[in-house]
Amino acid sequence: MNRLLNDIRNRSLSLRARMYLFSAAILTLFAINVATHVWGSFARNESLLAYRDSVTATQLLTELGQSLEAHRQRVLVLATLRETTDDSLGQEEQQAAVEDLNSMASQLRGLGAISAEGAEDYYRRLHQSASTLLADWRQFYDDYNSTTREIALDTASVAYEDTLERLEELDGQQERLAVERSAAIDATISLTDRITVIGFVTTIAVTLFLVISLIAKTNARLRRLKKGAQRFGSGDLSHRIETHHDAGEILDLARTFNDMSSKLHYAIEEVRAAQSEADAANAAKSMFLANVSHELRTPLNAIIGYSEMLQDELGDGNPIDSDQFHHDLGTIILSGRQLLALINDILDLAKIETGKMPVALETFQPDALIFQVCDALAPLVAQNHNQLDLDIDRDSMTEMCSDPAKLQQIVTNLFSNACKFTEHGTIAVHAAMADGVLTLVVADTGIGMTPEQQDKVFEAFVQADAQTSTQYGGTGLGLAIVKDFCEMLGGNIQVESAPDAGSRFTVRLPAAPESDRASA
Amino acid sequence: MTTHAPSDNRSGPILLVEDNEVNRDMLIRRLKRAGFAVIWAGDGEEALAQMRQHQPSLVLLDINLPIKDGWQTCKEAREDADLRHIPIVALTAHAMDSDRLAALEAGFDDYATKPIDFPELVAKIQGFLNA
């Protein structure tokens, strides 16, 4: 109930509560109308009955007056007869006279029954006089046949006059009452009519007002819902339908709409995110293909170009410059080897990217492996007039459970990379093991990289500069593969470098897979 | 506002701009064998200088160049009143259709994909020189 009052104060009633209130108001008005009508009918009926009594009383009074007059005539005739003759009154005649008196007495009683409210006093006086008169007449008949007694007609005459007077008084009073009561009936009728008309007009007005306000309110709320739904439909899912005017069903509906919108919003965002992820993956794939195509075409250009040129030179009949010919064939072979290395790197990278690069765990001595690789690549160091600073801390080394082939490729790629970008400098390879982690540092005193170049150095197909690719050769895939391998083996790689100050790559690899170390 | 008659252009040498030494030497030798006078440059900056100095009859321009790449070099040549009439053919290992369209839109007159089809390249060069 308190809540209802609160809601009414806040003008935020539910549709159902509103309907109930409206129905209650209309029913109350209707009940008032019915009550008024019932009371009106009752009052009218009461007045009508009283009026009828008055009219009946007047009638009875007239009849009684006539009976009295007729009987007096008869008494006077009998009295005259008795004086002039000695005729006695027959039994039957006497009987009829008494019956007549009785009937008048009963008429008097009947009059008494309907002479209420405002006529009792008059009736009482009439009753007194009439009773005296009737008693006198009864006495008259009793004495009639007695010769000894005088008939007291004088008294009867006085009583008769008196009775007639009272009769007229009562008659007058009853007539006044009848007029009064008829006026009361008119007043009641006009009053109930007025109340009924006012009641009906009020009921109609209130009902109309309530219905119109209900329609208007509901309409406004539904319009807000519709507008909101339209905005959702047009794709504006961040829109929210205002709910602070609403309550009950409309509020529920609005909230449901808002919920639906936010869920849709979320779902669409998810789909969009998935879409853009897929787009990014597709773009990356296309980019990869374009890059592969580009990388393969560069050595192929040399191979095909030189081969065609040599074929032309052989065919034109001029003497062959054997040194030149030998050099050109060397170029073709070098380009072919570069193409092969490129294809191998691309296959590795594709395997890594599709998650199909297997890790073959073996137990091996890392110091031996690193030394073998550096030894095998020693000619590369000499090529650019560099010196090798090899420092493997064999005392710290324990056996390692990892993928030796991948470690070998990591060392090879970093080593050849350092040799490629350094001239008349030093290539340093340091390795040590501590706390179950192998740390391998490959540092050079070569051309180095700017911070921007370092950011991209581990991306596939990126050499620090387009120039370096052609100047220094290489596939631009080596460092990307190194980084992927380091991560596959549970480790990482970092680079420190500055232009013309050399580069320093630091690899950290766990000596055993993550699960083994955790249980150890 | 060209200050050179077309006949002057045809008499000039072909300028080959290529940073890869192996591919550059190979192409110079083959073009010379085909009877063209060839000069060369190793980057975009040098290429523009050579164009101003020698007014070549045609430029074969690699896209991936150090210092100033092929796109920028072509753009600057097109903005230079003295150079804009010189035909420029792009040489690139980028072989996608989108790359070809991008090159033609960037102001290149033609486009050759590596590995170079030499007879086709010669036909293209002669087409420009005899225009």
Image (spheres, grey):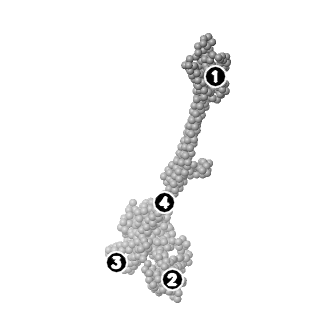
Q: Chain of mark 2?
A: A
Task: Tell me the distance, in whole angstroms, between the alpha carbons under discs 3 and 2.
Answer: 74 Å
Q: Are marks 1 and 3 on the same chain?
A: yes
Q: Chain of mark 3?
A: A
Task: Tell me the distance, in whole angstroms, between the alpha carbons under discs 1 and 4.
Answer: 114 Å
**What amino acid is at disc 2?**
Ala
User: Residue sitting at 48 percent across and 60 percent down?
Assistant: A267
Residue A401: % across, % down = 47, 83
Task: Tell me the distance, in whole angstroms, between the alpha carbons under discs 2 and 1.
Answer: 144 Å
Q: Nearer the viewer, residue A517 or A84?
A: A84
Q: Earlier in the sequence, mark 4 or mark 2?
A: 4
Residue A59 in the image: above or below residue A13: above
Q: Chain of mark 1?
A: A
Residue A92: % across, % down = 55, 19
Task: Tell me the distance, in whole angstroms, between the alpha carbons under discs 3 and 4.
Answer: 76 Å
User: Residue sitting at 50 percent across and 67 percent down?
Assistant: B68
Numbered disc 1: secondary structure = helix
**Disc 1 or disc 3, which is closer to the eye?**
1
* Tag 4 residue: A267
Numbered disc 3: secondary structure = loop
Q: Are marks 1 and 4 on the same chain?
A: yes
Residue A323 in the image: above or below residue A127: below
* Tag 3 residue: A319
Q: Nearer the viewer, residue A320 or A25?
A: A25
